[in-house]
Amino acid sequence: MRQHAPDNNQLDDPLESLIQAVSPHTRLTPEDIERLRELDLDLTVEYLNISEAVDRIRDDLGRVSGSIDENSALRRRFNECDTGAARFTDEEYFKVRPIGTFYAHLMTKNGREHLEKHLTAFEKSLVPALREDVDFRFESGGVKSVESVLDNLAKAQNAEGRLKEINKLKDAIRGRIIVPNILAAETVMENLHAVSAQDRHRVVSLRNSHRDWETAFEGRFHFACNVTLAPEDENLPPYELQIMTRIAESVAKVTHPVAINGHIRGQVRLPPVLERHMMGLAMGSAVKDGREYLTRRT
């Protein structure tokens, strides 16, 4: 059941109200809360009222994002199927190896054990290659839970919808890289370009906020690069890797449970003033990260 935050447009502390509204559905650490409060203060100093300044923050993000060099690893195409847009999918790969064929792996004990072994071996091969010349925190997401898969299937309204849910399951095995800043993310992406070019872990799908931030923010407010990699073993499912900064990670924990524009997976509905405050925080975090990146690059 979706929960509703109190509809009070005179909130003295919008961030605190936002944290209270999402806390039952996310795991905010003391470090996350500290980062969010620092971000909230910085944006308040610059924009005064965050919820009223969303359009100004959006404009600033457009200017910052537009200043990133097109030749940066953050934006370069990975292969001939990659159009350079915020999202791309190698349709041929998914025709030859439809994701639905791996669905049964998630639903049986033997299948899940097989995926766990593959996951461990895959990450041991991939992560050191991406760590060259950069330090980051890596978190293995493990094998997607049966409960999560069934929950998504239950939300599909008919058999066709359930089939679509199965066939778009690209994150059965997954992991996350948390970098200190976008410059470090750029280095990770440079390493990923090199790995993908060797066909060791080919990139077959991408959702990249650094290419087109506006498209990337549609429906779900978080600033990251979600990469789908193809294992060399054709009998195994693809692997989803998310790359994001520390502040983007903290913001994503807040935005993920919220239903935005009727997003079906959101469990929390916010009053308009809190939703706009949240949007301002999300885009404002990307503005801060982008400004720091441009300063470091120059």
Image (cartoon, rainbow, N blue to C red):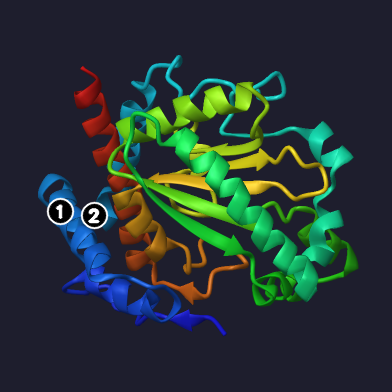
Mark 1, Cα crowd under 10 Å, few <14 / some 14-19 / many 20+, is some
- Secondary structure under tag 2 reads loop
- State left or right for residue 50 relative to residue 119: left
Number of other residues with Cα within 10 Å of mark 2, as a class: few under 14, some 14 to 19, many 20 or more: many
- Measured from the top left, where is residue 57 in percent x and y? 29, 42
Name the amino acid, label 1: Thr
Q: Along the horizontal axis of the image, is 209 left or right of 277?
A: right
Q: Nearer the viewer, residue 128 or 164?
A: 128
Q: Residue at x 61, y 27 (%)?
A: 196
The one nearer the camera, 186 or 194, is 194
Label 1 secondary element: helix
In the image, which disc is placed on residue 50?
2
The image quadrant that residue 117 belongs to is: bottom right
The quarter in which the C terminus is drawn is top left
| Disc ID at residue 44 | 1
Is the Cβ of the residue at disc 1 closer than 8 Å to that at disc 2?
Answer: yes
Classify residue 244 as left or right of residue 120: left
Please state the horizontal and vertical placement of residue 228, each as a whole percent of the image: 63, 42
The picture places residue 247, in percent across and down from the top left corner, at 29, 51
Residue at 15% across / 56% down in the picture? 38
Residue 191 visible to an observer of this rendering: yes
Residue nearest the observer in this picture, 113 or 222 = 113
- Residue 7 is situated, as x and y percent measured from the top left of the image, at 35, 79
Q: Residue furthest left?
A: 45
Amino acid marked by disc 2: Ile
